[in-house]
Amino acid sequence: MPFVNIRIVKEVIAADPAGKKADIAKKVTAAIMDATGLSNDDVWVVFEEVNARDWYVGKTDVETLRSKK
């Protein structure tokens, strides 16, 4: 059974975490079901939320990168 681990910057889904996670999980599950023929119950999706200040692109954290925009 496929296991999908999604790491996401917490602030990206802050407005509606439960709703956004449900929407992402639904779409990821549908894509895997379509590609494999597996059922909905065979696909597992897990979210790990990471603070923007703890996620780095190179030597700069995402919080700093976003504040420059």
Image (spheres, rainbow, N blue to C red):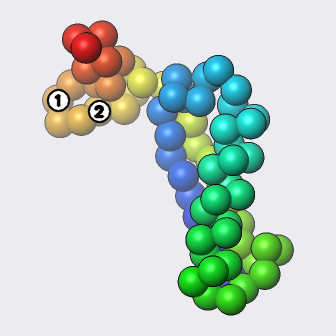
Type of amino acid under label 1:
Lys
Q: Position of residue 39 (x, y in %)?
A: 78, 81
Residue at 75% x, 35% y: name it. 18
Disc assigned to residue 28? none
User: Furthest-left residue in view?
Assistant: 59
Q: Is residue 35 above or below residue 13?
A: below
Closer to us: 46 or 26: 26
Kindly identify the amino acid type of the residue bearing the numbered disc 2.
Tyr
Q: Is residue 38 left or right of residue 10?
A: right
> Badges 2 and 1: C-beta atoms under 8 Å apart?
yes
User: With respect to residue 37, does 42 lie above or below?
Assistant: above
Element on which disc 2 rests? strand
In this rendering, does residue 64 appear at all?
no
Q: Residue at x 23, y 11 (%)?
A: 68
- Residue 63: x and y in percent read 35, 18
Q: Which residue is mark 2?
A: 56
